[in-house]
Image: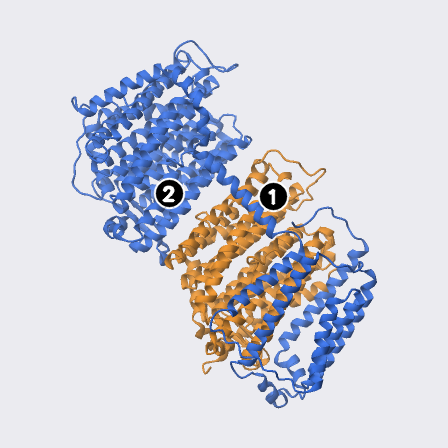
Chain colours: A blue, B orange
Amino acid sequence: MTDFLLPTIVFTVLTAFAPFFVARLKDRAGWILAIGPALFLAVLLKSAPGVLSGGKLTSSVSWISEVGINFSFYVDSFGLTFASLVCLIGAFIIIYSGGYNSHYHYTTRFYVLMLAFMASMVGVVLSDNLILLFVFWELTSITSYLLIGINHEEEANVKAALQALVVTAGGGLVMLMGIVMLGNIAGTLELSELIARGEVIRQHPLYFWTVICFFVGCLTKSAQFPFHFWLPNAMAAPTPASAFIHSATMVKAGVFLLFRLTPVLGGTEIWFRVLTSAGAITMVLGALFSLLRHDMKQVLAYTTISALGTITMLIGVGTEASIVAAFVFMVAHAFYKGSLFLITGMVDHGAGTRDLRQMGGLRKLMPITCTVAFLGVLSLGGMMPTLSFLSKELMLEAALHNHAVEKILPPAIVFTGAAFLAVAIRLFVVPFFGPLKHAEGAHVHEAPLSMWIGPGILTALGVFLGITCAGFGKEVITPVYNDILHGHGHELHFHVWHGVTKSFLLSLTAYAVGVALFFMRRRIFAAFEKVEGITKFGPEKGYDLFMGSIYKVASFQTRIIQTGYLRHYMMVTVLFALLMIGFAMLREHTPIPAFEWEMSYLHEYGIALMIVGGCVLAILANRKLMAIVALTMVGFGVGVVYVYFSAPDLAMTQVLVETLATVMFALVLAFMPPFRPLGTKRQRALNLTVAAAFGTLMSVLTWISFKLQASESISSFFAETSYLKAHGKNVVNVILVDYRGWDTFGEILVISIASIGVVTLLAHSVRTKKGAEVADG
Amino acid sequence: MTKALLFSPVLIPYFTATLCFVCHKMKRTQRVLVVSGALLHLAAAIALFVQVRGHGIIAHTAGDWSAPFGITLVADLLSAIMVLVSSIIFSATVVYALFSIGEEEEHFFYYPLMHTLILGISWAFLTGDLFNMYVSFEVMLISSFILLGLRGGRFQMEGSMKYFLVNLLSSIFFLTGLGILYGYAGTLNMADLSVKLATADPRVVTLISMIFFVAFGIKSALFPVFSWLPAAYHTPPAATSAIFAGLLTKVGVYALIRSYTLIFVAEVEFTHQIIVVIACLTMLTGVLGAYSQSDFRRILSFHIISQIGYMIWGLGMFTQLALAGSIFYLFHHIIVKSNLFFISGIVQNLHGSYKLDRLGYLFRNKLVLSMLFFIPAFSLAGFPPLSGFFAKFLLVKAGVDSGAYWAVIIALFVGLMTALSMTKIWGGAFLKLRNHPVEGHEPPGGAKGMMVSVAILATITVLIGIFSGPMFSLAYDAATQILDRSVYITAVLGGGA
């Protein structure tokens, strides 16, 4: 694994210096920045022979190993192939971006984000630890969020970016829960160890919910029905980013993880049902919509959705044949889909539009683009002898030989194949043939080398691997397949020409239908226009409803809770206390000692009358002065209680404070607004009830704690040691300045700070500022 | 020596505040004093942390009385962590304030008040006596109240009055609880309470604990008693609201963690279940509140509430891992949250407003600031590999371990909503290219200097993510320590008790 250190460093350094290269080299910066991924690819290829023959590379550094999080990587044939794809396509896309991005004001940001996006994806496919994988997984979500919304002049782009983030990151969070559950079941989070424990995991009672969580994570990421809607909107990204998202990164992360988890979670009823049906529905719907769109990028986006559906479906079927078919198709798709997006960019660049209805006859002016496009659509249409053709054959075989699906899936695959072919023909014929048509004022020109070299090589590879599939199957697909299924020694044999088998006949049917669909396209568009309204009720509507209702609920609850009125806040606080303490008190077995009437002397009644009477008077008072005097009465009453229990210093303090407070109140009285009852009668009745209930509760509580004293008070210690150790006869004073002098220090501080406050308040009241804004509510 | 360490986080700001108060008219002297006082506090906090991490709990009773008769100051790992993180935020705030606080505030004792504020905060973390904690709360409350109203506009006064009165209610509950508790147990030393209540009637202990739950709940801004927070935190200057946002509610959370691990553990299955329910409601209501706002700082303020829910959730689950998660969450959150308020201040400095409809263009024009916002914002939303992800992961793992799936689902949903409301700020202030700019606003300068604090805190956030292993060990050790009450009790009361 140490081999990977150097390319990682080079990659990072080049990315960090991207602003420098962009400033110096302008359009040619892409060539330099592509060195990073290219170097990484070289190291991957260097270690390929060893890995493909069964040697696995691992490396692990502890991160938070106590909870199973490690910085651990694991390179097997599957991961290696995938990472190579990412780097290969990534390098070409970076080169391409140089040509595409000329005169673009966010070039630097774009490069940095693309490279980060690529690195995250490589991280996903090479991680051993599931949390590490999740880290990279979410990084692809964030980087794609930034890439989709990079042209933030258009608010639609920002919205599309957010949608992608909400759907994929939301799914990711659900998956996180699945990861945690899986870790708890299996006792490890390392994929390499999980693979061997599939049996135990599938027997576990939590298996069902775990696998559901992973479904949500993978299906959202891979844009499967009903979460597919974010992907067509994500074409708001610059075309090179779209090419990358659709071919080797982001959406492929979901199916990658499904492949990886097949030996861990796969092979069960739920696995089969959910993945096969979600995949099949997505495949057919995606194919259908790809027939109906006119924007080249959107057409391609729907074919991607359909292709991912196919892969998901095949993983769900779960037989050896279907896994092989899924993998081969995934590789083929990565080669041609990235290229086709790049070609769209070239056409857009040259003809100034991506709308298929507004272009035509570009063949003469853009011959290279036309050639490359031919190679691309050959694969898209699944024509012989491309790798994509081989994969279609394999998937038909797999579907035909599985009893559970042999009735439903083959027709679905044939329809999808037909639609792909129709789209392929359309994407090739419409832009390049017929009379010359392009956007007004566009100066049609051929794409520069940096733009056509990548798609050219990638599409050529798609054809080349199809021709040489026998060797490719033996050297690459066999070990990959063994690594995915955690099996050993199974060798696969591929041939381009199978002879006239049932699947070949089905392929021919698909071709025929596809050509027919192409020629019937105007009629299909016309028919679709009549029913287009229905598409408004798709899952995207659900997303909009969800987002809208969350906002409504949020505003509603906030208006209710954060009213802006202090009296509400006070009321809620007291009610909360009432509820909490009341709830704890009204449980069974709460010891409430019986009330004993302990007052025996007349003057005790006198004091009680003074306090209670003061309270009642304060409530009933209708003049300010009256209320203040009544409150003072209560305070003096408490003072008398202190006298009665022989605490003269406390009593003195109490009386002094009460007197001072009353005098001050009386002084500011003149400045206060006139006294009037606030609120309606009902509100006041409510206030009274709450206050009375609360008072009662606190009294009972005091009674309980007083009666059921748990242990001796430490106050006897103060009385005993006050003179002997602290040399003071007045215990209260000694407590204040010695035993608890630290408290007194604090209280003095509080008074001093308060006096600072008075100074500032007075200073401000001299020149009151007026603010029109309301702070709260 | 250890004695000095224990008292210095309280005494250093005391002396600094006094000196600043005296020199408040000498601008330069005051500034020098303020910064050196803050750095000294930081040094003391680091020294205390190193000492506690290396040699265990330090406890000392003031005036050399023996506990529980005098007032004991205790620094265990949790306290030391809290003091250290607070001190980091304090230093960052002071540096930030140098570039952002107006002449007027400076003249009206802004700096002395900041120091008394950190004094109260450090004190609350270090005291081992419940009444003493009440006193420290008072120091904090009065300092923060005056800081809030320092500008004296009607806008500020309204916020600070709500803040003050509701918090005063909390103080009343606290004091009432103290009276009842002292009547019942005859002591207020926390270690002593832990010993004495262990043999008391659990029903009565729970009952009394509820008063404290309400008091600390208001301080921590739990559901439904959080309203004072969004009413006030967006009114003062950014430097003030940043330190409030980072630290004040966390003192409440600390008090809850401390009291519900050390003292009120008689009926964990009842009390801590309530805490879990309240925690979930707090998470939800906070994030919904945030999502409904359209003011930079109001969004952030509501987020504080939501995040408090996570921390309290860990306390409610009451396992070692869950508490470690809470502690991890605490220090992650403090750094991130203060930083976001710092950034809001820079944005205000540049555009003259906190309202999202008046902002925009920042992603186009201020790339560095955008990146610096992105780090704490997405850390807060729990995106890996930033610190918030690990904090959330630990709690989710603890939740799954204890089988509380419904709470886990709420927590994850809230995580998504947090991301959503962060993108609301991102979209509104950074991406948007149309706004109603504040007429005639000229940036007063200082934004570059303010960025220093932001950059430092963002770096810390990234580092917490990268070194989450050692950070986790730290949080885990702190959790182990607070769950094993005997260590704390022995350190305070001595071996015999």
Q: Which residue is mark 1?
A: B294
Tell me if mark 2 has few (under 14), some (14-19) or many (20+) residues whose alpha carbon lies within 10 angstroms of its own: many
The correct choice, above or below, for A39 with respect to A2 in the image is above
Towards the viewer: B408 or A24? B408
Residue at the top extreme?
A435
| Visible residue check, residue A625 | yes
Towards the viewer: A221 or A460? A221
The correct choice, above or below, for A491 with respect to A1 in the image is above
Residue B123 appears left or right of A122: right
Residue A356 appears left or right of A156: left
| Quarter of the figure that contains the N terminus of chain A | top left
Residue sitting at x 41%, y 11%: A361
Chain ID at mark 1: B
Q: Position of residue B56 (x, y in %)?
A: 46, 71
Q: CA distance from mark 1 to mark 2?
A: 31 Å
| Visible residue check, residue A123 | no
Towards the viewer: B333 or A470? B333
Q: Position of residue A557 (x, y in %)?
A: 57, 49
SS category of the residue bearing label 2: helix
Q: Which mark is residue A216?
A: 2
Q: Position of residue B263 (x, y in %)?
A: 50, 72
Residue B265 appears left or right of B142: left
Residue sitting at x 72%, y 70%: A616
Identity, as a three-letter code, of the amino acid under mark 2: Val
Q: Which mark is residue A165?
A: none
Q: Position of residue A112 (x, y in %)?
A: 46, 37
Tell me where residue A474 sits by quadrant: top left
SS category of the residue bearing label 1: loop
Residue sitting at x 28%, y 46%: A265
Tell me if mark 1 has few (under 14), some (14-19) or many (20+) residues whose alpha carbon lies within 10 angstroms of its own: some
